[in-house]
Image (cartoon, rainbow, N blue to C red):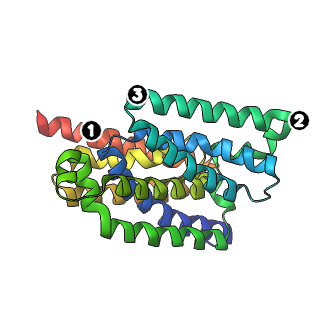
């Protein structure tokens, strides 16, 4: 299967994307941001729609710009404590998705962008892989510099603030990076399932990890295994790659959950 260039490109992309999803997903799960990443995925459709209205030929550019603005705005509003965090994020997610669909449905334009819903990693090019590699470097740098601060914030924001941690700056940097990885990956992963790839490996890892190091390591391993097995399985079964990866990640999650229950009993 890897004698084909498009399959090799897909494999390279998976080897870059899935570890990023695994490591970023641990922070998303720790900070209870599952709804947040889901809303970001839905906002991509609005980014595409606004780009189409403005005549931007590359939808990725408009998705990234709108995704970053949307993420920062959402983070700011949730800090106002007007209502529950989940409620605010759900409202923004639903609004972003509906707005994108309404704009794109005008004059029948939605058909041109429907592939963004389920993604197509087999269409990724070498230049796009390089862009993902650049994001990978940024995320690794952020993780080296801010992972302990982000973890401290997830445990006790008040204590983190008393230790001199700039909570607003750390959170904003993190959500900008999440927005970047989501928007750059969504064309190949798909709007409908990208949140699953962020959450499932981290959630599976949390089931069996005994410490923070294991938590991060298992999340990356589970994400990689899901990605590679999903690519191979989808090729031989003739089915969509993204959903197949999610199904394998789901199987891993339920297997680790069963292990945790057995150990607990």
Q: Which of pointers 2 and 1 lies earlier in the amino acid sequence?
A: 2
81 with respect to 161 (left or right)? right
Rendered view: 27 above or below 128: above
Q: Which of the labelled discs sits on residue 82, or is there none?
A: 3
Kindly report which numbered mark, 2 or 1, lies closer to the viewer in this rendering. Answer: 2
Q: Is residue 203 visible?
A: no
| Mark 1 residue crowding within 10 angstroms, few (<14) / some (14–19) / many (20+) | some
- Dividing the picture into quadrants, the one containing residue 224 is bottom left
219 with respect to 90 (left or right)? left
- x, y (%) of residue 249? 42, 46
Q: Which residue is label 1 attached to?
A: 257
Q: Residue furthest left?
A: 265
Q: Residue at x 44, y 52 (%)?
A: 175
140 or 190: nearer the viewer: 140
- x, y (%) of residue 115? 71, 46
Q: Which residue is label 2 attached to?
A: 107
Q: Is residue 139 visible?
A: yes
């Amino acid at each position: 299967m890897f004698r084909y260039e498009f399959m090799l490109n897909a494999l390279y992309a998976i080897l870059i994307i899935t570890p990023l999803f695994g490591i970023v997903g641990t922070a998303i799960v720790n900070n209870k941001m599952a709804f947040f990443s889901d809303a970001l995925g839905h906002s991509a459709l609005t980014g595409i729609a606004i780009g189409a209205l403005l005549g931007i030929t590359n939808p990725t550019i408009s998705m990234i710009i709108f995704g970053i603005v949307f993420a920062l705005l959402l983070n700011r509003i949730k800090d106002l404590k007007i209502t529950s965090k989940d409620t605010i994020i759900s409202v923004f997610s639903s609004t972003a998705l509906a707005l994108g669909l309404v704009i794109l449905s005008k004059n029948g334009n939605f058909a041109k962008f429907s592939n963004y819903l389920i993604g197509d990693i087999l269409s990724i090019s070498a230049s796009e892989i390089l862009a993902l590699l650049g994001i990978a470097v940024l995320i690794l740098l952020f993780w080296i510099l801010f992972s302990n601060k982000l973890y401290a914030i997830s445990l006790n924001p008040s204590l983190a603030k008393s230790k001199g941690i700039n909570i607003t700056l750390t959170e904003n940097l993190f959500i900008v990076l999440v927005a970047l990885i989501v928007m750059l990956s969504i064309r190949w992963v798909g709007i409908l399932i990208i949140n699953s790839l962020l959450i499932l490996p981290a959630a599976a890892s949390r089931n069996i990890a005994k410490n923070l190091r294991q938590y991060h390591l298992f999340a990356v391993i589970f994400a990689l295994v899901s990605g590679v097995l999903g690519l191979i399985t989808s090729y031989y079964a003739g089915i969509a790659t993204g959903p197949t990866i999610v199904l394998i990640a789901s199987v891993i999650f339920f297997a680790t959950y069963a292990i945790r229950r057995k150990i607990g009993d």
